[in-house]
Structure formats: C-alpha cells, structure tokens
C-alpha cells in the first residue's frame, strides 16, 4: 500500500467552514477524512459526505453504530449508498449486528470498534468481564468471523494482535498517534506514526498534529508531508 493510504485525518471540527480549507488542501495527500459525531451531528451525514466528495476527499464515517442487527443493517445500507470508503460499528453490538453491517456494506469497508482507549482496565472488567487485551482479542476474532474489513484499536495493542496470525486478514487502524514534534494534547499512551506502522498498523488516524500543527512545522500540508516521509522511511 502506498504511503498516502496509510494516513486518515480526523476532521474534528463543528462546521463546513472550518472543514473546507483542511479538506481542500489535504485531499491529495491522505487516504480519507474521519468524520465523527461532532460534525455529523452539527451538519448531517449526507451534507458532510457530499461536501468532502466534492472537494476530492474520501470519507471514513465514524458513526460508531451500536444497535440491534436490523437497525445497524439499515443504517449501513444508507451510508454505503453515500459511497463512504469506511464506516464503523461497535464490536459490542454483537456478531449479528456486525454481520448485518457487512451484508449491507456495498463497496464500503466495515471497521469494528474494539475497546475504547478511554476505558481503563477496571472499567473494562466491569463492563466486559475481561482485561482490555483479552477483550480486544476476542472482539477482533469475532469481527473477523463476521466478515468485517478491519478494527480500530489502541497502538499499544498492535504488537499483541500481530502475534495472532488468524487476524492477518483484518486491517488495523489506530488513533493515539503523535509525531515527535507534535504536542500530546489529551493523548497519553501514544506512538509515533513510524512506530505504529512498524508495530502492524495498516493506517494511522491523526487529528490535531495535522489540522493544527506547531508553528515551526508550518501548514497542515507541511505536517502531512512530514508524516508521509516518516512513514515512508519504515515501509
Ligand atoms: O487530534 P487527535 O490526533 O488526538 O485525534 C484522534 C482522533 O481519534 C479523534 O477523532 C479521537 O476522537 C479519535 N479517537 C481517539 N482514541 C480512541 C478512539 C478514537 O483518539 N480510542
């Protein structure tokens, strides 16, 4: 896969005005734009998706579907009809819901959210009855069996998942990425883009280091070019 396909930009803004310069300038350099609950709720999915497509970008619709199979299947059919590159479903919605998403994905890819990295060990045990590593592995196996295209996981889990050959067929997308030159913001357990790719990430999801880079780095395009070089150096 070329380096461009390894970078997903998190478009964490609340209006099309703020999104426009980012999508316009970055579309030639990145795989797709992750549109999350903020922009989806503020503007509406069809409008945002059409806007990004018109500017030459592709979309990862981060709607994190978490519902019964019938509802997930119908929502999946709608987003697939919009031509998004990727969309996601919480693994905790269960195998039948994932299968419903897969059955209705059209040409889009289905990613499963494993355990949110905001959930610590104690909370993971309380919700899912197992530690994060174990639960991420179980969810990943279930997602693979249900036909999902990939998973979203923490960079910390990549190495462990990489030791499970039966999961080789799943793409692994990871947030929590910080180049050495970027501010940590609220991210804690991070990896650099190169480290994450070396640890087995298919693509890295990066927001603020690209959308709001430090002054000495320059523009979002300068930032993405630097990250592209970093990733290329380990491919
Ligand atoms: O700006 P930053 O690079 O921290 O953005 C990371 C993106 O990935 C945000 O959209 C954030 O919500 C998302 N994300 C995350 N950690 C998770 C799941 C999603 O940072 N565990």
Image (cartoon, rainbow, N blue to C red):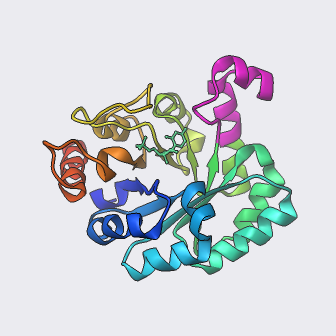
- Look at the image and give the residue range highlighted in magenta: 114-140
Q: Nearer the viewer, residue 153 or 164?
A: 153
Is residue 119 something that shows in the picture? Answer: yes
- Classify 90 as above or below 124: below
Residue 178: name its quadrant. top left
* Residue at 72% from the left image edge and 46% from the top image edge: 91
Q: Is residue 155 left or right of residue 124?
A: left
127 part of magenta stretch: yes
Give percent across and percent down for residue 52. Answer: 44, 74
Give percent across and percent down for residue 212. Answer: 30, 48
Give percent across and percent down for residue 146. Answer: 73, 54
Q: Main secondary structure of the magenta part?
A: helix
- Classify 178 as above or below 218: above
* Residue at 77% from the left image edge and 60% from the top image edge: 99
* Residue at 31% from the left image edge and 72% from the top image edge: 24
Q: Is residue 23 left or right of residue 46?
A: left
* Residue at 44% from the left image edge and 25% from the top image edge: 188
Give percent across and percent down for residue 144. Answer: 66, 49
């Amino acid at each position: 896969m070329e380096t461009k396909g390894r970078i997903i930009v998190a478009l964490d803004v609340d209006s099309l005005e703020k999104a426009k310069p980012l999508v316009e300038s970055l579309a030639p350099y990145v795989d797709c734009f992750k549109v999350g609950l903020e922009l989806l709720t503020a503007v509406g999915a069809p409008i945002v998706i059409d806007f990004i497509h018109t500017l030459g970008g592709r979309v990862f619709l981060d709607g994190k579907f978490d519902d019964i199979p019938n509802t997930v299947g119908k929502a999946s059919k709608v987003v697939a009809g919009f031509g998004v590159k990727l969309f996601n479903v919480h693994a905790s919605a269960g195998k039948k819901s994932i299968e419903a998403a897969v059955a209705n994905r059209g040409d889009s890819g289905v990613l499963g959210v494993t355990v949110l990295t905001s959930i610590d060990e104690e909370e993971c045990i309380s919700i899912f009855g197992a530690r994060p590593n174990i639960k991420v592995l179980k969810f990943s196996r279930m997602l693979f069996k249900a036909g999902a295209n990939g998973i979203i996981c923490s960079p910390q889990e990549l190495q462990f998942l990489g030791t499970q050959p039966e999961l080789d067929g799943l793409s692994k997308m990871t947030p929590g990425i910080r180049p050495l030159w970027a501010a940590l913001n609220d991210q804690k357990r991070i990896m650099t883009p190169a480290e994450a790719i070396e640890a087995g990430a298919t693509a890295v999801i990066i927001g603020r280091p690209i959308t709001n880079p430090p002054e000495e780095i320059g523009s979002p395009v300068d930032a993405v070019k630097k990250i592209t070089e970093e990733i290329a150096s380990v491919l």
